[in-house]
Every structure is written in structure tokens, then in C-alpha cells.
Amino acid sequence: MKGGRPITIRGIVIPVDWDEKGKVIAAAVSTYTEDEYLIDNDHKGRELLHFIQEGVEVRGIARQNKDKNMITVQQYILKKTWE
């Protein structure tokens, strides 16, 4: 993982990993262009676990980790409808 670049993405928060009790423990943003960004499991990233299947606009630092897009969330806005 190297540095990263500032990015703003829009999409839906989706679950990508669960614990043994079925609780979501990791999520990603699936964009409307069919890109998927795994959300870092830091404080801001964990906040998005409460918004599974919700529309969001996320600003953060994007980077590649192996073949996966990752994003460190700096700021997010819940979106009910897109303009």
C-alpha cells in the first residue's frame, strides 16, 4: 500500500464480511459505475457500518491494495436521492 489520492465517490454501502453471529464487520462502497471501494476499518470507516444499503457520498484517500480499491474515509454524507 502506497500513499493514495484524494477522491470523492458516490454509491451504496454494502457488507463484505460478517462475524460468526452474522454482524457486519467490514463494508465497501459500490459506486454507480460498478467500482467497489473497501472501507478502511478506522473510526470514520466503522461509522459507515451503520448505513448498510444506504446511499452515500464519501470523500477520502483512495489506494490500491493488491487488486482491491481501498478508501480511507475523511468525510461522508448520507444521500437519500441523487440530484
Image (cartoon, grey):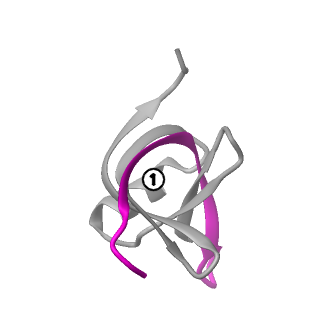
Q: State the image coordinates of residue 81 (x, y, percent, origin top left).
A: 55, 20
Name the residue that disc number 1 marks: 50
Q: Main secondary structure of the magenta part?
A: strand
| Quarter residue 22 falls in | bottom right
* Segment colored magenta: 1-23
Look at the image and tell me whether residue 23 can be seen: no
Give the quadrant of the N terminus.
bottom left
**Camera-side residue of 20 and 4:** 4
Residue for point 71% across, 47% down = 34
Q: State the image coordinates of residue 2 (x, y, percent, origin top left).
A: 38, 78
- Count neighbours of disc 1 (C-alpha within 10 A) and say few if under 14, some if 14 to 19, many if 20 or more: few
Q: Is residue 45 above or below residue 54?
A: below
Residue for point 61% across, 72% down = 68
**Camera-side residue of 78 and 71:** 71
Residue for point 63% across, 85% down = 20
Q: Secondary structure at mark 1?
A: helix
Residue sitting at the far top: 83
Is 74 situated left or right of 62 in this image? left
Residue for point 32% across, 71% down = 42
Q: Total label count?
A: 1
User: Is 29 part of what is drawn in magenta?
Assistant: no
Q: State the image coordinates of residue 23 (x, y, percent, origin top left).
A: 57, 71
Residue type pointed to by label 1: His
**Camera-side residue of 10 and 7:** 7
